[in-house]
Image (cartoon, helix red, strand yellow):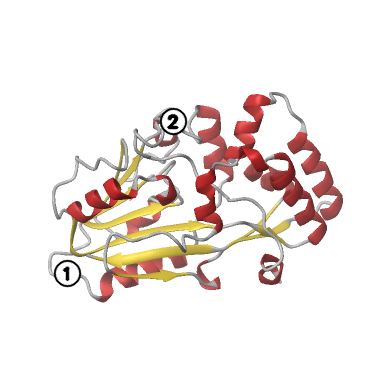
Amino acid sequence: MIKSFYNHFVISYCDRYWFGVSIIQRAMSIRLFDGKEHAELYAQYRPTYPSAVYTTIEEYYNEHKGALCNTELAVDVGCGNGQSTVPLCKLFKRVIGYDVSEQQISSAPKGIANLTFKVGSGEDLGFLKDNEVDLITIAQALHWMDLENFYSEVRRVVKPGGVFAAYGYGNNVVDKVNAQDVVNEFYRDLLGTYWDKQRKHIDEHYRRMSHPFTDWKRVENDDIAIRRQMPVEAYIGYLSTWSAWRSYLKKHPGSDALEKVKEKIEVVYKGSDISVQWPVFMLIGRK
């Protein structure tokens, strides 16, 4: 049912925080998901990826892994608060989450024995040796990178036979047309000019994005989609993490626009939960 809605409706670019774009092309001050309050909202309300995403990565890694590949080290670039990082800890002996935002890192989980976090730009993986890494992942952040510099680093640090996987989730779809119309209006009419142009890559599900290795493929199917049942309050919390909304609030502090969205959606659902789906897409390949 939700799939049919997806064919007819578009919500937001479902963006992630700013990560690691080159200093020349984008000023380092542009960090759309930086700041303590936003990092906390992100940790609380952003959807997590289903286990099928990590099963896909694991199976691809094991299928033709190189002789030096021993599940020793995985690095999650643009890790944010660690939502996409923690699941890797079950698959690899050591995992490093790496992000430009100290605030996002401060919201990441603590106390996982084989997990550490570092702060820095994705185009500079200087803390890693040549041919040291079994797997590099980047979730919902590839479109912010200076790909030439980032991919140069990926090629340098990944072991022969190792894997690079970039993935993200697209425009979310709710299960009732009237509610979808409300959110579309919020996204398009109110926030339309506040979305960064790079969000087009999320909207296009990375169809025009390249990969650092010649041996790669694109994966997108219902099996790896994110599906959630959530109260209206939680869904509004998710909408509050949109970078366009955060940018809008900077120019219109105290705006009640999101509260009005909540009131309209509550009329539609009458106390029941919302069914939400985000399509997940992946570019995965081997050195």
Rendered position, 181 above or below 38: below
Closest to the observer: 43 or 80?
80
Rendered position, 205 above or below 39: below
- Amino acid under label 1? Gly
- Amino acid under label 2? Gln
Q: Is residue 207 left or right of residue 131?
A: right
Q: Which residue is mark 1?
A: 66
- The kind of secondary structure element at disc 1 is loop
Query: How many numbered marks have been drawn onto this rendered protein structure?
Result: 2
Closest to the observer: 165 or 97?
165
User: Can residue 114 be seen in the rendering of this structure?
Assistant: no
Residue 103 location, x and y as percent?
A: 44, 30
Residue lying furthest bottom: 63
Residue 158: name its quadrant.
bottom left
**Residue at image coords 48%, 32%:** 34
Residue 26: name its quadrant.
top left
Residue 263 location, x and y as percent?
A: 82, 42
**Residue at image coords 38%, 52%:** 138
Q: CA distance from mark 1 to mark 2?
A: 36 Å
10 Å neighbourhood of mark 1: few (<14), some, or many (≥20)? Answer: some
- The kind of secondary structure element at disc 2 is helix
Residue 229 location, x and y as percent?
A: 67, 58
Q: Which residue is mark 2?
A: 103
Rendered position, 190 above or below 174: above
Residue 246 location, x and y as percent?
A: 61, 33
Q: Is residue 250 left or right of residue 266?
A: left
